């Protein structure tokens, strides 16, 4: 779908709009298109930029009509103490406003530019522009990219008190947003989360949130149709060699499956832009898929999970947040009461924490249950971030040798030598449990095991995959696209019993586990996925912190 179609749709909405999307979903590129389309200085370049796009044959009456003021708040400095933050933010805004004055100087009196440059305060500069533009009837358009970056960094690095000081009462950040009300004919804010906006609500309460509006579900990211069209373009240009459909099939488990609107659950899912282009670049330049399916830039984003896990700084909610992360890693999904706004002082509350995981792209909509939204891990790329976070977290409490574990996983994949790996992880689990209160539990055990199984990328660790009218705990599906010589695949049934369980109860679990493993292994899907490998059926049983059985059935 031609993204310029959304320009017409945006104009049908209220004049002050707000949209959140995860990082690396093409927000900045879309905003660049908006700036070009609405800027009066670009009116003679319309055909150059839009001539072959949908909007060229469907131009709106607001095309190239505005003087556009554009901020990217990720570029505003956010280090230092409160007074330094104010000075840094004021300096950035002042430079941008000075550039605005230079760009549009010809529309005003000869001293317009020099007057604005002489004012040291960015708020005063804005007030002067407002007076002059309104006196001449010039419409103004404010576009802010990463509107929440400045304050989110303050929140994560300096804590809630400084954040509160900036966004409440006479806080300078709040004062800037108060200035925008009434000054601009149209405003478009883009960011990652709605946290900042809620804290500014008493000073800036004019936005219409379109983040979960189904009409804008696919405005950011790529639909499968768009990916296919893009790949076909490069193939027609003789730059892309190979089967496009096979490439898309290989990408989907890693980069697809995002949904941002409850009413769009039955629509095509959305691909992550950054990852799609990363894959395409490898195919064009090297004629093969990337050696590592996860771009290093996405890997560094895993730090945002660390930030969310410690967002209250005092650790008062750490247990509930870790329990949530472990539940997501174990089950692959969780029920969420999605909050479209919440104040910073409640950011660590469990409902808000779950919502933040969605806003940061670590969960996506996959269904409903009553009023709640069923959120799942979008794809393997994000699943790796969860597992990476968990095994880093667990390593604080255990002494497992990760290099040695990698060697054992390689033996598991290529030689079918699986027992040493599970014995090592079982020892680490006991060490971990002995120093953490409340650690014991099936969900935690599942998350712990999955985190270490995902240490290398030989397998796609499928959570609770449906097989033959049941759900197996683990199916280690070999990634044959990157490791065609892997010879072993695994169906694992994990049984957990409390420390007080009797031998009779353990025996009943074993009998059930044997039946389930044979049932799963007869599934047509399981046999198809395991083609070309030896399929092992493993039963692993824990009583409390101790592994009491580890056998092939």
Image: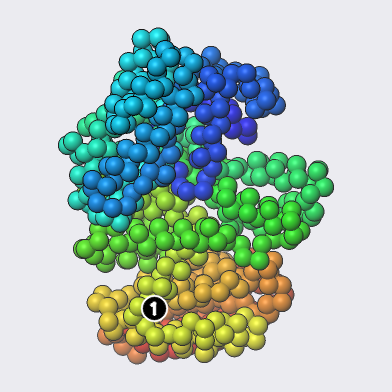
Q: Residue at x 24, y 37 (%)?
A: 172
In this view, the residue in front, 335 or 527, is: 335
Residue 101 versus residue 489: which sits nearer the camera?
101
Relative vertical location of residue 64 with respect to residue 238 in this rendering, above or below? above
Kindly indicate the quadrant of the structure image that contains residue 18: top left
Q: Is residue 535 left or right of residue 133?
A: right
Instruction: Return the x and y of residue 385 as percentages of the image width and height.
Output: 47, 63
At a point 40% along the width and 34% down the height, the residue shown is 95
Q: Residue furthest left?
A: 169
Left/right placement of residue 553 relative to residue 345 reads right
In percent of width and height, residue 297 lies at: 53, 58
Q: Residue at x 63, y 22 (%)?
A: 45
Q: Give the image quarter of residue 331.
A: bottom left
**Could one spot residue 553 in this view of the protein?**
no
Q: Is 478 placed left or right of 196 in the picture? A: right
Label 1 crowding class (10 Å Cα cut-off): few <14, some 14-19, many 20+? some
Residue 325 seen: yes
Quadrant the N terminus occupies: top right
Check the picture and name the quadrant holding the C terminus.
bottom right
**Local secondary structure at mark 1:** helix
Q: What residue does disc 1 label?
A: 395
Please name the residue shown 46% across and 19% down the image: 105
Picture coordinates of residue 326, whole percent (x, y): 37, 67
Image coordinates for residue 439, horizontal then vertical, percent:
30, 76
């Amino acid at each position: 779908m031609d993204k310029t179609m959304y320009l017409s749709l945006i104009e049908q909405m209220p004049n002050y709009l707000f949209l959140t999307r995860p990082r690396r979903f093409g927000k900045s590129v879309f905003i660049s298109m908006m700036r070009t389309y609405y800027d009066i200085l670009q009116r003679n370049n319309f055909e150059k930029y839009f001539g072959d796009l949908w909007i060229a044959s469907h131009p709106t009456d607001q095309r190239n009509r505005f003087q556009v003021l554009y901020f990217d708040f990720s570029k505003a400095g956010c280090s230092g103490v409160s007074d330094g933050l104010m000075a840094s933010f004021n300096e950035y805004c002042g430079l941008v406003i000075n550039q605005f004055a230079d760009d549009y100087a010809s529309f005003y009196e000869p001293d317009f530019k020099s007057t604005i440059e002489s004012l040291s305060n960015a708020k005063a500069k804005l007030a002067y522009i407002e007076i002059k533009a309104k006196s001449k009837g010039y419409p103004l358009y404010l576009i802010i990219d990463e509107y929440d970056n400045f304050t989110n960094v303050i929140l994560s690095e300096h804590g809630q008190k400084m954040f509160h000081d900036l966004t409440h009462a006479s806080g300078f950040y709040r004062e800037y947003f108060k200035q925008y009300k009434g000054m601009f004919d149209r405003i478009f804010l883009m960011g990652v989360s709605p946290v900042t906006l809620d804290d500014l609500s008493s000073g800036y309460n004019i936005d219409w949130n379109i983040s979960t509006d189904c009409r804008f579900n696919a405005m950011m990211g790529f639909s499968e149709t768009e990916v296919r069209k893009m790949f076909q373009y490069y193939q027609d240009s003789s730059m892309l060699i190979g089967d496009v459909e096979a490439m898309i099939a290989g990408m989907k488990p890693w980069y697809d499956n995002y949904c941002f609107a409850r009413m769009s659950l039955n629509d095509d899912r959305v691909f992550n832009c950054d990852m799609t282009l990363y894959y395409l670049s490898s195919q064009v330049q090297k004629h093969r898929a990337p050696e590592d399916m996860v771009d290093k830039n996405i890997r560094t984003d895993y730090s945002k999970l660390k930030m969310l896990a410690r967002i209250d700084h005092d650790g008062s909610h750490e247990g509930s947040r870790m329990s949530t992360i472990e539940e997501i890693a174990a089950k692959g999904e969780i029920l969420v009461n999605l909050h479209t706004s919440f104040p910073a002082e409640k950011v660590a509350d469990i409902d808000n924490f779950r919502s933040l995981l969605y806003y940061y792209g670590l969960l996506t909509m996959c269904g409903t249950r009553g009023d709640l939204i069923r959120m799942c891990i979008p794809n393997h790329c994000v699943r790796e971030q969860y597992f990476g976070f968990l095994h880093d977290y667990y390593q604080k409490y255990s002494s497992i040798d990760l290099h040695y574990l990698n060697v054992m996983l390689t033996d598991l994949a290529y030689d079918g030598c699986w027992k040493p790996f599970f014995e090592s992880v079982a020892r680490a689990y006991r060490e971990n449990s002995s120093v953490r209160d409340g650690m014991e539990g099936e969900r935690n055990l599942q998350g712990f095991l999955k985190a270490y199984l995902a240490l290398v990328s030989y397998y796609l660790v499928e959570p609770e995959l449906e097989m033959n009218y049941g759900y197996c705990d683990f199916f280690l599906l070999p990634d044959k696209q990157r490791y065609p010589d892997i010879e072993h695949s695994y169906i694992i049934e994990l049984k957990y019993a409390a420390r007080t369980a009797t031998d009779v109860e353990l025996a009943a679990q074993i009998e059930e586990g044997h039946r389930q493993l044979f049932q799963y292994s007869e599934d047509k899907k399981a046999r198809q996925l395991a083609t070309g490998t030896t399929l092992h059926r493993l039963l692993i049983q824990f009583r409390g912190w101790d592994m009491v059985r580890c056998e092939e059935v």
